Image: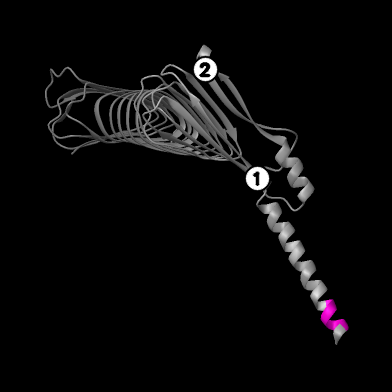
Amino acid sequence: MKNQFYKSAALMMLAMLLSATTLWAEELGKQVNRSFNIRPDTKISVTNKFGNVIITKWNRNTLELKVDVKVNTKSESRSRRLLDAISIDIADKIASGSLSIETLVEGNSNNSEFSIDYEISMPDTNPLRLSNSFGNVYMGSYTGPLDADVRFGQFQAEDLNEANLHIEFSNSMCEVETLKKGQLELKYSKMTMDNIGEVVIDCQFSSLKVARADKVRLDGKYGDIEFNTVTSLEGEVLFAGFKIGELVERLILETRHGNGITIDKVSRTIKMIDIEGEFSTVDLGVESGTNTRLDFDLEFGNLKSYGEGINFDKVIKDINKSAYEGYLGSKSASSLIKVKTKHGNIRLEVE
């Protein structure tokens, strides 16, 4: 009986030791806490990987950095080696106008065994270069120049109001409330935005949804692109779906092998539509009361038109070709809707 008791006690103590070792290994980590006095023109560079970055703005000429490194492995010795392999390189060159913060990981490590999380409090007016891989980025509004690169993570921001913006996403999910002006690159990503001003967009193998856009230059390849309302857009769409809820003034677009060009509502304020497409259908819904000239040219395709006020005073039909010139509303209208397609149909409806 005594032997059984001592044996059970020994096993229990061994289990507790193993549990404690495992718990200790799971909680192994280190922190970096630094504070820097910066000038309004100090250029900030932040480069992280395998963790999250949270940017919080405040009205101080100070940048406060908190880095939390956590390691979770099955071996105490491996945990220590891995922890020693992770460092935060800080290049404090504020006197010459820059501050650089970068995560360094030596060797080949399984990133599922550790995380490196940043919390940064700083003014939202300094030029910021931000890069994060295999982690998320959260920031509120930012009014300074911003160059952001996010890969394999999420990006969430409120109002990005500076005119000098360059944002690049790869294999990421992104949400932005307002993007005033700049360049946006998407690859294998999904992005939603509420309002954008004057923006150049390169969208490849991605899904893009924008509630309202002012002036857009678009290069879209493979994916789905949708604007609820857009004032002016110019660009090219290849092998992608493209939809506009309401077009206010202007659209110049080339499309090939797409999933269809759809504009639910062409506003009566329209000035110009010029679409040239191959192997893609074009579907236009035009607001009643619109005055515009019409010019359609089709090769291996058909035109269908519905609604009142559509007049074609010149129609040419051949075996595989057809051309229509006319007007909607006023014959002397200054605005023009022009569509040229090959291997695609055109549908025009006045609503």
| Residue under numbered circle 1 | 29
* Type of secondary structure dominating the magenta stretch: helix
| Residue under numbered circle 2 | 94
Residue 8's spot in the image, x, y percent?
A: 81, 78
Quarter of the figure with residue 342: top left
Above or below for 299 versus 55? above
**Nearer the N terminus, badge 2 or badge 1?**
1
The N terminus is located in which quarter? bottom right
Question: Between 73 and 241, which is closer to the camera in this rendering?
Answer: 73
Residue 118 visible in rendering: yes
The C terminus is located in which quarter? top left
Residue 313 visible in rendering: no
Within-10-Å neighbours for mark 1: few <14, some 14–19, many 20+: many
Above or below for 170 versus 236? below
Question: Between 183 and 338, which is closer to the camera in this rendering?
Answer: 183
Residue type of the residue flagged with mark 1: Gly
Q: How is the image coloured?
A: one colour
The magenta stretch is: 3-7
Q: Is residue 130 magenta?
A: no
Image position of 221 (left or right of 21): left
Residue found 17% across the figure and 29% down from its top:
268
Q: Is residue 5 magenta?
A: yes
Quarter of the figure with residue 152: top right
Residue 87's spot in the image, x, y percent?
A: 66, 33
Secondary structure found at label 1:
strand
Marks 2 and 1 sit apart, C-alpha to C-alpha, by 29 Å
Residue 248's spot in the image, x, y percent?
A: 23, 28
Image position of 140 (left or right of 325): right
Image position of 9 (left or right of 129): right
Residue found 50% across the figure and 14% down from its top:
97
Secondary structure found at label 2:
helix
